Amino acid sequence: MLMLNCKGRLIKWDQPVVMGIINATPDSFHSNSRAKTIENAVTMAETMLAQGASILDIGGQSTRPGSEIIGPEKETERVLPVIEAIIQKFPEVILSIDTYYADVARVAVNAGASIVNDVGSGLTDADMLDTVALLKTPYICMHHSGSSADLHHPMASNATIQAVFDFFIERLDACKIAGIKDIIIDPGFGFGKTVEANFALVRDLAILKQLHHPILLGVSRKSSIYKTLGGSAETALNGTTVLNTIGLMNGANILRVHDVKEAKEAIQLVTKIYS
């Protein structure tokens, strides 16, 4: 059972769920995830919801290696119209805002977002944890080993799962001290980890269940997959589904993906096996 309190609205899921990615950015690494217009974003949302997405994740800043960092004002300009348009068309939709800026999180939640997805884990913006506590939303805390300027700073591959585990012990404590009630952990596949470490993280994902918080897995079309297979982000769907399936078998509760239909099918089949 996955249960979240989204601003007083209690959401319950009895099996893992899919989070669909909608990027209000011109430079996210997978071009098909980019919403080039507000109308395009609404169409993407409609398709993902029809395919079985339970959450839609709206982001206004690319975090791929080498991407340009923009400020909160520009990020707000990108995400706010998208959030407002999707909420207007689908009032009951559960949106998460993908940002490491407290100001963007505040504006997005006031506009209708229900979850804050922070790749900075409260370390990039010192106001983030207190802001989320005041907003009373669930919080996704992602592991990384760098700063906002270098979220991809590499870490030692032979210490990855231990380092991630220790990181979350400290961050979970900080979140709880701030007053955040619902915390989801994201091990940060692709952020500051070697290819070998990324695959080890999926293999050892079940270790993180000892932290007793829902686990989000975000492997969708990332470079560790397509570099290993000798392809590109555009050809990495099958590899993504394989890793999502292994992640589900190891305890993942939320799959953050570009391709909702395939992720939903993986959940249905894995659930069938274990039911």
Image: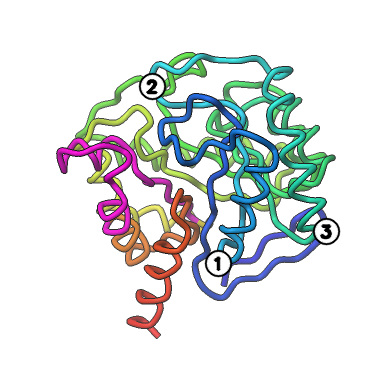
**Residue depth check, mark 1 versus mark 2: number of the one nearer the observer:** 1
> Label 1, on which residue?
52
Q: CA distance from mark 1 to mark 3?
A: 23 Å
Q: Position of residue 62 (x, y in %)?
A: 51, 26
Earlier sequence position, callout 1 versus callout 3: 3
Q: Identify the residue at image location x=71%, y=45%.
A: 180
Q: Is residue 60 placed above or below 184 in the rendered structure? A: above
Residue at x 66%, y 15% (from the top left corner): 71
Q: Nearer the viewer, residue 143 or 73?
A: 73
Q: CA–CA distance between discs 2 and 3?
A: 37 Å
Question: Residue 13 location, x and y as percent?
Answer: 60, 71
Q: Which mark is residue 65?
A: 2
Q: Quadrant of residue 52?
A: bottom right
Q: Secondary structure at mark 1?
A: loop
Query: Picture quarter containing residue 235?
Result: top left
Which three-letter amino acid code belongs to the residue tagged 1? Gly
Specify which label sits upstream in the sequence, 2 or 3: 3
Quadrant in which the C terminus appears: bottom left
- Whole-number angstrom distance, CA of label 1 to CA of label 2: 30 Å
| Residue identified by numbered label 3 | 8
Badge 2 marks a residue whose secondary structure is loop
Q: Residues within 10 Å of mark 2 (few under 14, many from 20)?
A: some
Residue 175 sits above or below residue 29 on the image: below
> Which residues are drawn in magenta?
215-242
